[in-house]
Image (cartoon, rainbow, N blue to C red):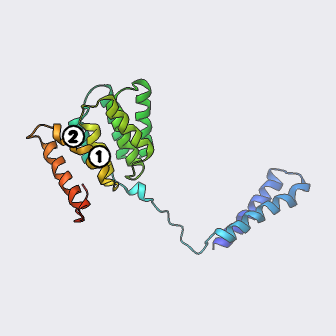
């Protein structure tokens, strides 16, 4: 069936060009040769026996991390200009539009280039767009957020989380250890970080626990 459709399209296109488009008769052979070249390419690469069923990519199937967004709101921004940009980015992320989610934060950074919350959000958005991989762009965004506000816990927390999830547990531990040491003694974030550090230590010792 695929071959019949391909041949029919070639004949239809040639007829349309000749009698509707009124291309010069001297170019008919050249046009036919171009169509035959395309047909040859289909014969080489095409698989007409396969059903025409669209496939979704793994990126499209990856859900938006609502838990991470809520944790970011809890320990970083919630209101103000950065919060508005981040809310728009989260909305796009929920729709699976990870590229647009990162782009909207870059627009915000053009207005306020020294906002650490926007740099943190960009790091998270780029990790989501990369399917969990900490790209050089995401790495730079996290480090820029830390540079702009060295005492804030959010950037090293999420930077470490992204590194741990991508398998770079030693780098994650290096970020989390000083953060846990300066966190309030009875705080939830300190308890969480200390638990994560123990799991990383066990992994590095060869006990291989689940990465957070």
Q: Which residue is drawn at 79% across and 54% down?
A: 17
Q: In this view, does 162 lie to the left or right of 98?
A: left
Residue 182, position as x, y percentages in the image: 17, 37
Q: Which of 149 and 206 is in front in this view?
A: 206
Q: Which mark is residue 160?
A: 1
Q: Is mark 2 on a helix, strand or loop?
A: helix
Q: Relative to 69, is 206 above or below?
A: below
Q: In this view, does 155 lie to the left or right of 129?
A: left
Q: Nearer the viewer, residue 12 or 84?
A: 84
Q: Is residue 186 left or right of residue 93?
A: left
Label 1 to label 2: alpha-carbon separation: 10 Å
Q: Which mark is residue 48?
A: none
Q: Which mark is residue 179?
A: 2
Mark found first going from the N terminus, 1 or 2? 1
Residue 148, position as x, y percentages in the image: 33, 29
Mark 1 residue crowding within 10 angstroms, few (<14) / some (14–19) / many (20+): many
- Residue 18 in view here: yes
Q: Is mark 1 on a helix, strand or loop?
A: helix
Res 16 quadrant in image = bottom right
1 and 2 marks in contact (CB < 8 Å): yes
Q: Residue at x 41, y 29 (%)?
A: 109
């Amino acid at each position: 069936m695929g071959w019949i459709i391909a041949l029919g399209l070639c004949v239809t296109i040639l007829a349309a060009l000749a009698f509707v488009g009124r291309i010069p008769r001297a170019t008919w052979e050249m046009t036919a040769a171009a169509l035959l070249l395309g047909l040859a390419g289909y014969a080489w690469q095409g698989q007409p026996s396969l059903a025409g069923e669209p496939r979704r990519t793994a990126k499209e199937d990856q859900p938006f991390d609502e838990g991470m967004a809520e944790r970011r709101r809890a320990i970083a921004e919630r209101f103000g200009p950065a919060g508005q940009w981040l809310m728009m980015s989260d909305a796009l992320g929920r729709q699976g539009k990870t590229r647009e989610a990162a782009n909207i934060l870059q627009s915000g950074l053009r207005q306020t280039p020294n906002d650490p919350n926007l740099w943190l959000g960009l790091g998270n958005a780029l990790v989501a767009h990369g399917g969990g991989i900490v790209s050089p762009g995401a790495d730079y965004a996290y480090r820029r957020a830390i540079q702009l506000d060295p005492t804030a816990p959010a950037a090293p927390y999420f930077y470490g989380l992204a590194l741990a999830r991508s398998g770079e547990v030693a780098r994650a531990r290096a970020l989390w250890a000083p953060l846990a040491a300066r966190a309030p003694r009875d705080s939830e974030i300190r308890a969480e970080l200390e638990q994560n550090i123990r799991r990383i230590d066990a992994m590095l010792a060869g006990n291989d626990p689940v990465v957070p």
